Image (spheres, rainbow, N blue to C red):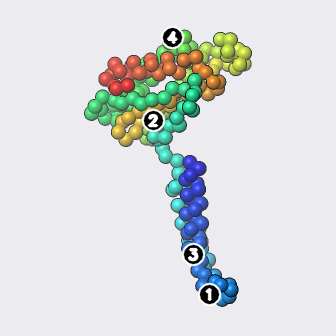
Amino acid sequence: MAIFKHVAILLATLQLASSYSVSGNKANNSNVRVSSGRREALRNIAFAGVSAALVAAPTTAFALESCKPGANNCVEGKWSPPAGASKTSAIEDLRSAISAYPQAGQSGVDEGGWTVANDDLDASGSARVEYRSSGKGNFAKFFNGGKPFVDDLKIEIDENNMVSFKSASRVGDSDFGVNGKRVEYLKDLLKGKGWSI
């Protein structure tokens, strides 16, 4: 996103510079004339501001951050619905798989339940689900004050119905395979609906 801000600043600078005209003898700086009307300068500033806003505006979806290289607490990948599936049916399958995940957890994972924190699949194509550990283990007691660890599953569906996902722990360097187990469970549910994983 920082590159977009630099481009926007460059556009603004170029636009403002174009509103000034310089004439005269450059060798001895005589007869240098700078002319610009206030109306023209304000118009150029407004144009530069709109350009900056358009260039720096965040995209709605299709921009999941990748897991950090070598991360032991993050899993990412792509899923695709059956050929010919509409975006609506792909979203229904995703919601169905998420809802089918046990609130009590599975395989010793996510025993503190889960919550859909954001579901904007219909509009922007993105969703986020928070999964919690039980908070009863020694790591939770010693390193997290007895509170559950929270992981985020982020999902984005693009214009071709390809689904990108990222499941990551909020804290720590390792998740002891928790994110992988969660994703495998969801993957199996989607495979049962004909998805390619």
Could you give the CA–CA distance between mark 2 and mark 4, rounded to whole angstroms? Answer: 26 Å
> Measuring 52% from the left and 35% from the top, which residue is drawn there?
66
Above-or-below relation of 68 to 47 = above
Q: Residues within 10 Å of mark 2 (few under 14, many from 20)?
A: many
Name the spot of residue 134 as percent of width and height, x first: 61, 14
Mark seen at residue 156: 2
Per the image, the residue denoted by label 1 is 24
Per the image, the residue denoted by label 3 is 19
For the image, the number of numbered tags is: 4
> Measuring 63% from the left and 24% from the top, which residue is drawn there?
173
Name the spot of residue 177 as percent of width and height, x first: 54, 17
Could you give the CA–CA distance between mark 1 and mark 2, rounded to whole angstroms? Answer: 58 Å
| Disc 4 + disc 3, Cβ < 8 Å | no
Query: Relative to the observer, which residue lies in front, 165 or 74?
Result: 74
Q: Which SS class for mark 2?
A: strand
| Disc 2 + disc 3, Cβ < 8 Å | no
| Amino acid marked by disc 1 | Gly
